[in-house]
Amino acid sequence: MNTFLSISILLVFVVWLNYEIKKNSRLSNKTSKEFWDKETLANQKRAEDISGLDYVQVPFDKLPKQDVSDATSNSYRDTIFSLSDKKILNLSDLTNTELKLKYGVSNLAILSEYDDNYTKLVSFLHKWGERLLGQGYLGKALAVLEVAVDCKTDVHKTYELLADIYIIKGTPHKIDSLINKISPINVRDKENLLLKLDKQRKSI
C-alpha cells in the first residue's frame, strides 16, 4: 500500500512539474516575443525633438569654488564643474527600448550621454558633500548637498546626510522642506527614507 501511494505521489509530481515547465516556457516565449516586437518597433521610430525635455539646471553659482586643504575634495569639485557646459537629463526610469520608442533610435546615443552626465553629477555631488563634511567644512558641505537636492538627486544617502547637517546646525525645521522635495522624486526605498526623516524631525 505504501509503495503504491509513493508511486502515485511521484506520478502526480511528475505531471505537475511537466505542466509548470511547459507553462513557464510558454510565458517565456511570449515575453521574449513581446520584447523583440517592441524592440523592432523602437528601431523604426523616427527622431523626435528633444530640445524641450526637462534638462537639469545646475545652480553652479551656489557651489563652493575655492580650493580647500583636501585634494580629494578639490578633485570632486573639478569633476562637477567639468559638467557646466554639458546637458544633463535623468532618464533612469526608461529602458533603452523605451527611450527609442519615445524619442527615436537616432537620439539614443545622445540621450544616454545626457543620462550618464546626470549619474555622474549626483554621484559626485554626494561624494563631494560627504568628503567636505568629513574634513570639517560644514558650511561648504551644506551648500553642495543642497545643490544636489535642487537637481532632484535620486541618491538616497544625500537626503539623510543633509538632514543630519540640519540637525547639527540647529535647523531641524528645514527637514520639512526636504521631505516635501523628496515626495515627487523616484528615490530608492523612498518610504523608509521619508519615515526616517520624519522621525529625525520629531525627535528634536
Image: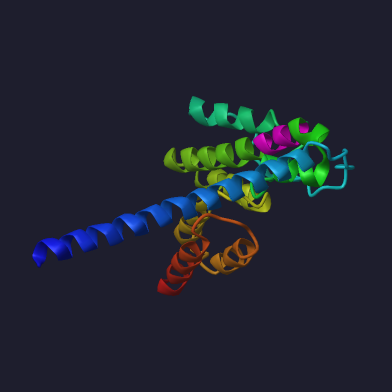
Q: Residue at x 90, y 42 (%)?
A: 49
Residue 139 lies in magenta, yes or no?
A: no
Q: Which residue of the protein is positioned furthest toward the left in this rendering?
A: 2
Q: Give x and y (percent) for residue 106.
A: 82, 32
Query: Is residue 10 shown left or right of residue 84?
Result: left
Between 158 and 53, the one lying in front of the other is 53
Q: Please say if 35 is above or below 66.
A: below
Between 125 and 134, the one lying in front of the other is 125
Task: Evaluate whether residue 86 shows in this view.
Answer: no
How many discs mark residues in the rendered view? 0
Q: Please say if 120 is above or below 10.
A: above
Q: Which residue of the protein is positioned furthest toward the bottom in this rendering?
A: 202
Residue 112 lies in magenta, yes or no?
A: yes
Q: Residue at x 60, y 57 (%)?
A: 186
Q: Residue at x 71, y 32 (%)?
A: 113
For the record, the magenta segment spans 110-117
Query: Is residue 161 shown left or right of residue 119?
Result: left
Q: Residue at x 44, y 38 (%)?
A: 135
Which quarter of the figure is the C terminus placed in?
A: bottom left
